[in-house]
Amino acid sequence: MTVKRQILRSATLIGFVTLISRICGYLRDQRVTFLLGTSPAADAFILAFRIPNLIRRMTGEGALGASFIPVFAGYLREKPREEALRFAQKMFWDTAVILAVVAAAGCIFSKEVVRIFTLFGGVQAHWELAVFLNRIIFPCVFFVGLAALAAAILNTFLVFGLPASTTILFNLAVIVFSFGAMYRPILRWTPAEYRSPAVALAVGVLAGAAAQLVVQIPALARRGMKFMPAISFGDPGVRRIGRLVGPAFFGMGMYQINFFMDTIFATSRRMPAGSVASLYVADRVMELVLGSYAIAMSTALLPTMSRQAAAGKFGEMKSTFTFSMRIVSFITVPSAVGLMVLRTPIVQVLFQHGRFTADSTALTARALLYYALGLPAYGALKMVTPMYFSMQDTLTPARVGAYALAVNIALNATILLLFFRFFTNGGPALASSLAAYFYFLLLFWIFRERYGQLGARGLAGSLAKVAVCAAAMAAAASLGLRLTHFAGMTHVLEQAGALAGMIGVSVGVYFGVAWLLRCRELGEFLLLFRRGEAVYEGPAIEGGGSGL
């Protein structure tokens, strides 16, 4: 099996598991919107959830892994296995100490934390509920941070399935706590002024976070990891990761930081009620695509590129990047177009139930339009940042990310002050999308200037064909909307059937045109079904494999 097949198979495994997780995540969000709609309580829960979730997502989707995997891969390549595992043990306990302090501070200073992230919202009663919920949720950063480190260790051993599946447990925990049999007993112990299903949902978030760590411990133990306390902040490897992780936390988590900036602007008095919830739901719809393959490809890409960089095979590393960019663009560009054209039917079918009304759908569909515009850029960022991290350069993405954050803030302020009546609650989403394109293009240009050609001409040719295919798909989806008279449908099963039909026909048109244009990405997917033996360019590792 070639490196391409190895990456595709790993990414497909991760993507399949992540897709199941995203479906569970949808069911989780559907329960949240069913119980809370876009009410003030929903805004309070989502705000409280977003604050520690910013740390959860930034660590879980790459910051710890981006810093740890290249260093740990070097240990496994150059040192005895036992020494490498002792280093991982020290890293585990040092991380546990830091996360415990952060979790405690987040609970103690919950009011101040919430106040920082509602700068434009004034004093509103439901922010008091957010403070209470934040104290329940914030300790989850301890569990998910360690779970992210455990996943990075397993990913280095080429075990991907188990770490990717932990988010399924997280989502299931929240779903379980969303039912009356669970939340009614919890509410009896809740102060009267805070009694809301949101409290039980917050408890579910904490329980799910703990489960993410617990299920990975046996897999680590089977690979020789020991868990006796071994705190050593002075260890050279730990210090090296410490120098890398700060910039990586900022650079890899720029998408989440920008989204959080959107949340701050969404608390403005000018925004309609429910704007925070609408941005959250729109982001969740978009991440069904982004998380299912772009993040999966990124997760599979980093260990491979780290091994190539450690071996000095920079030409192969750049070739791996170009291949991954083409594959991800082949998926994210048509996905963005489909989300933009079918945004209202998608939101209506998925969420318009219970307290999530037609007005909630309109708010969310507007935000989804502008988030989907940036989907190809978000996917591309997931490919370009691992290239820097594999070379143990986390500072450049952080510096460029700071510029992108400044662009996002400037765009958010400009849209809010000058163009609010055109974009309303969609303004923050548009600002983030434009900032993402700026971030990617600048990172791509800098790497090209430092290390030479990255196959930009070939990428442009592939993107041109993908654009033609996506345009044909958009025409098919628009025609489907007119022919089915979706807006006049009232029954959810009828709506779901019509939406599934439109999506199926549109996807068929996309792949049909891709076949006519001889897009080579179609052929590369066939690598998944060819036989051959794997080539692993690194140290012999026991207990590797797919992680199934």
Image (tube, rainbow, N blue to C red):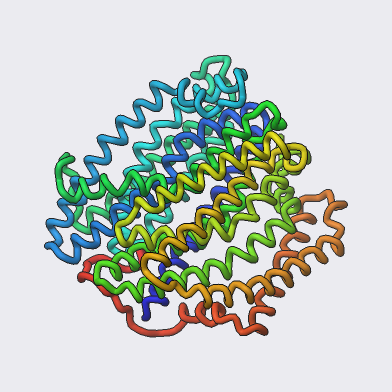
Q: Position of residue 165 (x, y in %)?
A: 43, 55
Above-or-below relation of 304 to 223: below
Looking at the image, residue 19 sits to the left or right of residue 245; the answer is: right
Query: Could you say which is closer to the camera, residue 335 or residue 430?
Result: 430
Which quadrant holds the C terminus?
bottom left
Query: Residue at position x 64%, y 66% from top?
Result: 334
Q: Position of residue 522 (x, y in %)?
A: 56, 79
Query: Residue at position x 64%, y 29% from top?
Result: 268
Q: Position of residue 418 (x, y in %)?
A: 72, 37
Q: Quadrant of residue 219?
A: bottom left
Q: In the displayed image of the protein, which residue is found farthest to the front?
A: 449
Query: Could you say which is closer to the camera, residue 400 or residue 124?
Result: 400
* Residue 542 in view, yes or no: yes
Looking at the image, residue 174 sits to the left or right of residue 102; the answer is: right
Looking at the image, residue 470 sits to the left or right of residue 174; the answer is: right
Query: Residue at position x 38%, y 63% from top?
Result: 387
Q: Position of residue 22 (x, y in %)?
A: 54, 53
Above-or-below relation of 525 to 212: below
Above-or-below relation of 407 to 83: above
